[in-house]
Image: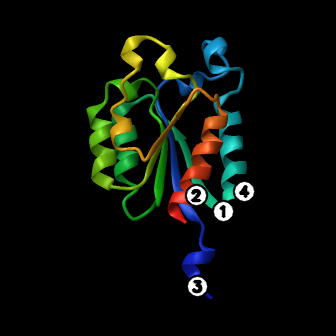
Amino acid sequence: MHNEKTMAKHVLVLNGPNLNMLGKREPGIYGAQTLADVEALCRAAADDFGLSIDFRQSNYEGELVTWIQETLGTADGILINPGAYSHTSVAIYDALKAVALPVAEVHISNIHQREAFRHHSYVSAVAFGVICGFGTLGYRLALEAMAQKLA
């Protein structure tokens, strides 16, 4: 029996600033689901795809960077919805590049249909894939892609 086959791959699911406001913030763009709903969706998807997850949210760039750094030796991949930090954070880009784990980037809205400043993401340059515009389903799709990547 191979232990590495039976042990679930571990994915850190990170959510950036204002994602704690899901369900309250601009429901026409972000929908009615709350961050707790997204966490439940991710936990169910992780079970379906044989992953274990650690689900976190922070409004603080430095905290996100620290959590990314802490994945060394503890996680197999990172799913991140960096929120507004997608468009501004070289620090998050650098941290993701430094840990060199597979990264899946998720956005609830289609960032390419929004303001021009949202069309560029620093995170995309280090992500193996980007999902945007499919609402919270994007998290499930990204976890499925991550499971395939880690298989």
* Residue 43: image location, x then y, percent: 68, 49
Which is more N-terminal, label 1 or label 3?
3
Q: Judging from the image, what secondary structure is the residue with disc 3 in?
A: loop
Q: Is residue 74 left or right of residue 2?
A: left
Circles 2, 1 touching at the beta carbon (< 8 Å)? yes
Q: Pick the residue in front: 64 or 26.
A: 26
Q: CA distance from mark 2 to mark 1?
A: 7 Å
Amino acid type at mark 3: His
Local crowd size for mark 2, using a 10 Å CA cut-off: few (<14), some (14–19), many (≥20): many
Q: Is residue 61 left or right of residue 50?
A: left
Compared to residue 113, the image places residue 71 above or below, namely: below
Residue ID for mark 4: 48
Circles 1, 4 touching at the beta carbon (< 8 Å)? yes
* Residue 32: image location, x then y, percent: 72, 21
Q: CA distance from mark 4 to mark 3?
A: 21 Å
Q: CA distance from mark 1 to mark 4?
A: 6 Å
Residue ID for mark 3: 2
Q: Residue at x 31, y 30 (%)?
A: 89
Nearer the observer: mark 2 or 1; the answer is 2
The C terminus, quarter of image? bottom right
Local crowd size for mark 4, using a 10 Å CA cut-off: few (<14), some (14–19), many (≥20): few
Residue ID for mark 1: 50
Q: Residue at x 72, y 56 (%)?
A: 48
Q: Judging from the image, what secondary structure is the residue with disc 2 in?
A: helix
Nearer the observer: mark 3 or 2; the answer is 2
Compared to residue 99, the image places residue 96 above or below, namely: above
Amino acid type at mark 4: Asp
The N terminus, quarter of image? bottom right
Q: Pick the residue in front: 88 or 23.
A: 88
Q: Residue at x 58, y 85 (%)?
A: 2
